[in-house]
Amino acid sequence: MTKILENINDPSDLKPLNNNELNQLATEIRDFIIKNLSKTGGHLAPNLGVVELTLALHQHLNSPKDKIIWDVGHQSYTHKIITGRKDKFHTIRQEGGLSGYPKVKESEHDIIETGHTATSISSALGLTLARDLKGNKEKIYAVIGDGALTGGMAFEALNHAGHLGRNLNVILNDNEMSIASNVGALSHYLSNLRTDPKVTKIKDDLEYLLNKIPKIGTKMSKSAERLKNGLKYTIIPGILFEEMGFTYFGPIDGHDISELKAHLKKADKIDGPTLIHVNTIKGKGYKPAEETPSDFHGVGAFEIESGKSKNPKENLTYSQVFGKSMVKLGKENENLVGITAAMPKGTGLNIFEREFPERSFDVGIAEQHAMTLGAGLARGGKKPVVALYSTFLQRAYDQVIHDVCIQNLPVSIAIDRAGIVGNDGETHQGAFDYSFLRTVPNIVVMAPKDENELQHMLKTSVNHSGPTALRYPRGEVYGVELDKKVEELEIAKGEVLKEGEDILLLAIGSMVYPSLEAAKILKEKGIDASVINARFVKPLDEDLIEEYINKTKAVITIEEQALKGGFGSAVLEFISDKNIENVNIKRIGLPDHFILHGGQQKMRSKYNLDKEGIVKEVFDFVNNRPEVRVWPKKNV
């Protein structure tokens, strides 16, 4: 029998398929995703959970005229496969290949680019208003997960959409998970709907019945109003959404294509916003992913039969060292508490949580709340460490300024996944934290060269009397030995790692070791470089930097961050403010454009952020600036 998937190249190809054929196609797509991701890695479990939902949506709608907005977007693989990108799917998240998220440049069916959560309803409402202003009639659907509803922006959008009353459809994809298990009162509410799915009755039907009761009508008493509301809450599932102005459908089986199609048709007949509550299984159809969906949310290459990684990690990661260091410090300091936003495992705080569950707080996907919660804990006498990925810290910037730094509170911000993160691409690269943090008064910003320095910096951060930010990269550590005794570092003090006469390599964080390795190569080629581990972006070790700049009058700053406003910019500002004259300076870092997806080491190499690239940049520097003191040298 010919595989159905072979003949699917556009959503219109789904139109003639019956439900049995759609179910067969769903099976083929799951096999296709599993086979490809076993080689490339990617977001496996969330995509396996929405196959039927995606097929039902695309058969029902006429994309791209009708519009589907995917929240986060890491559940859009089936959407990509049936919208003409099947033959390129083996390149997913690889350099030069398909993005793991919706991408406007890839397809007209990708309406909004996204990689952060809780944004879909806002975007969809904007499209709805634009449609209505133009007098058009296209259908607009936002697909949002239950985990995303812990993000306050989603509720801001629901509130506004309900108030406006426009024809907008929201699908709540409820799989009881974000990356980690969902937390909070809303999660409990949705759980109750899942476990007790009474027959759905819309509010107007119930009000009609209540109005038939004698003496209860338009002139009903306050007690009757309370009775009506009480009955609504008892009988109608989804009353929360009903009260926000949405017509609620569900919960329904998100893997039953017939039921999905029926409810999509019902929703389109409603005048005003609707919310379709769909229950799905994260990892559906692949036993290892169904059993441990959090482990298969995002994966590297894996063996299909066992689900085991093809490239098991041997070294600790920075996240794990952070978590273990938190445990060490937690034993010393009973006031230490950890806060994360739905990333306990990703940040390593799950290690601290196992040891100190009562001092660990997962707030869900709510970075703004996490930061201000930390401020409140600090004001209450605790020592909070807020652990976030660099890209998600961007979402809490106002809270960093308004709630933490203005009050000069001792909140430690642990910034994981800083710099190039690799295959997740533009929306996840940690390229801007130096820039947006170092402009804020009161905060100390630091970055360790390795895992041993990380644990010392964490203690430095926790023991400091004001706000601090500690930034470290994604991935495995260098494998250096960890000191048994963790001690504080002196703030604003760098360290000289190598003395040299010709040029200064002034590096920070993940770029320190590549700079040291580059210095060895340069020495062999006739250039003697000093190497300094700056340690602190704010405040700089001004005395040390000035001393070594004056030795050579030639300095190269090296950072895994955007050059605009970053560490190198801080050094330039310092040179200007101190009126240090006749200095030749070059900055190495990320250019002024968003960094695409690709392997972490490949992308570092692309932007000359490895030893070979640094050597290349040094030679370019001295060859184009005859005033640099290294002149003349053999082999230069």
Image (cartoon, grey):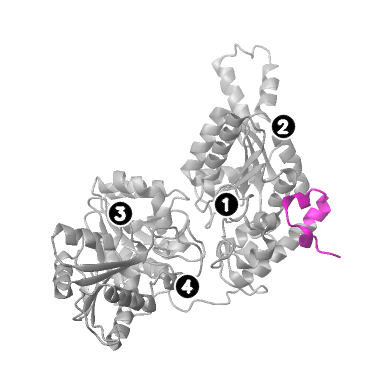
Mark before the other along the chain sequence, 3 or 2: 2
- Is residue 244 visible to us here? no
Q: Judging from the image, what secondary structure is the residue with disc 3 in?
A: helix
Task: Tell me if residue 285 comes above or below residue 57 in the rendering.
Answer: below
What amino acid type is highlighted by mark number 1?
A: Val
Q: Which residues are magenta?
A: 1-23
What amino acid type is highlighted by mark number 4?
A: Lys
C-alpha separation, residue under disc 4 versus residue under disc 3: 27 Å
Q: Position of residue 243 (x, y in %)?
A: 57, 30
Q: Position of residue 611 (x, y in %)?
A: 36, 78
Mark before the other along the chain sequence, 1 or 4: 1
What amino acid type is highlighted by mark number 2?
A: Lys
Q: Label 3: few (<14), some or many (≥20) within 10 Å? A: many
Residue with the mark numbered 3: 437
- Which labelled disc corresponds to residue 269? 2
Q: Could you tell whether 61 is left or right of 434 in the image?
A: right
Q: Are marks 4 and 3 in contact (CB under 8 Å)?
A: no
